[in-house]
Image (tube, grey):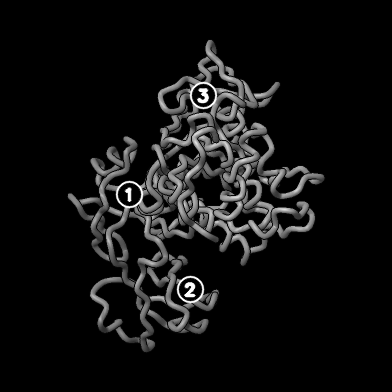
Amino acid sequence: MNRGKLSFPSTLGRGAGEMSSLSVRSLWKGYPGTPVLQGVGLDVPAGSLTAVLGLSGCGKTTLLRVIAGFERPERGTVSLGGRTLDDGRAYLAPERRSVGYVPQEGALFPHLSVRDNVAFGLSRRERRGDAVAELLELVGIARFARRLPHELSGGEQQRVALARALACRPQALLLDEPFSSLDAALRGRVREEVQALLREQGVTTVLVTHDQEEALSLADVVAVLRDGRIVQQASPAELYERPVDERLARFLGAVNVIDAQFEGGLARTPLGALELRGAPSSNGAHARRAARTGVVMIRPEQLDVRPREEGAAGAGVTAGLRGHIEQCRYYGHDALLHIRAEQPSGAQVLLARVHGEHALAVGTPVSVAAHGPVAALDEPAAPPSGQLTRPN
């Protein structure tokens, strides 16, 4: 894909294309008997790629359609670059918003060529210029200009849909799970190319997805939509390392949730004394820290696992637990170990991620320790006394 910057003619885009922030405030939207969005707030920095992540049916597409102007909210405000798009009184029609929209299946016109699909919606004068050809070159489909959509692969069709959305130089671009219909190998390549293109063009972008890996790997900012509300909006690293509650921690990947006693900046756990990352923004974690008890989150990659001889004390491990491998899920580049921990009050399972070359056979006795800071979590719902980790 040629990733050079485009120099569109000044007539193309009607003055759009500048970097503009997108803001959604207290957005409510539902359908008869079905509440969908319940006070959603979302900030998309100018020129950023922000992912809205959530389970299927949580309202992600409805949110995009309201931003695009296809749906009217019951109340709330949508603004772009300081200009009000909808606040219940003022309302701009979709074609006047300078917002590009790429639906999940691309929605190309089957009877139009690639070039005509991309040029659709432009004036006759704009179509006669070089901008469409340059855009086709930019997204890597110039050689397919005369083909019809059914003659293209899924990835090529998505590039056509993206080019069509960019043709009018929108101030914001909305992507509705654009990679979900592609096979795994193609999906990874196409989304990396699209990410590079959008960054270089400086387009303010909102991507909705139910794929945690996609959101964390592509976006500058991730906003998690749950039960009609944004429960946390943060950088991918902060979201993964400091989720606001246990439910979100588990949604973002495998996790060990372990009882802890807090002493200053430390959490004392069965795995040893571990540094705290700092309390999440919610009040629950602060209250539990004041009470000196609660739970902490430890990701599988934070566990160090070493084989030991039966009866050995785990030489070389300064603190931790003894156990044995109950299950090993091998993925090639890494492996997820299920470790049955030994403790007087009963055995529990820990999850540890190791390099594939360090995968261990079922039954191997091990010593387990933790490294790196850990995060306190909300919604502790304390497990039975003596239990090491809450069920996954």
In this view, the residue in front, 286 or 208, is: 208
Callout 3 secondary element: strand
- Residue 188 placement (x, y as % from top left): 56, 62
Marks 2 and 1: in contact by CB < 8 Å?
A: no
Residue at image mark 3: 27
What is the crowding at mark 3: few (fewer than 14 residues within 10 Å), some, or many (at least 20)? Answer: many
In this view, the residue in front, 84 or 185, is: 84
Q: Earlier in the sequence, mark 1 or mark 3?
A: 3
Residue at image mark 2: 337
Residue 250 seen anywhere in this rendered image of the structure: no
Question: Please, what is the three-letter code of the amino acid marked with disc 3?
Answer: Leu
What is the crowding at mark 1: few (fewer than 14 residues within 10 Å), some, or many (at least 20)? Answer: many
Marks 3 and 1: in contact by CB < 8 Å?
A: no
Q: Earlier in the sequence, mark 1 or mark 2?
A: 2
- Residue 219 placement (x, y as % from top left): 45, 49
Residue in the image at 61% along x and 43% along y? 176
Callout 2 secondary element: strand
Residue in the image at 49% along x and 53% along y? 197
The correct choice, above or below, for 191 with respect to 44 in the image is: below
Callout 1 secondary element: strand
Question: Please, what is the three-letter code of the amino acid marked with disc 2?
Answer: Leu
- Side (left or right) of 77 relative to 34: left
Query: Which label number is shown at residue 376?
Result: 1
Per the model, the C-alpha gap separating discs 1 and 3 is 30 Å
Residue 294 seen anywhere in this rendered image of the structure: yes
In this view, the residue in front, 217 or 384, is: 217
Residue in the image at 43% along x and 51% along y? 200
Per the model, the C-alpha gap separating discs 1 and 2 is 23 Å
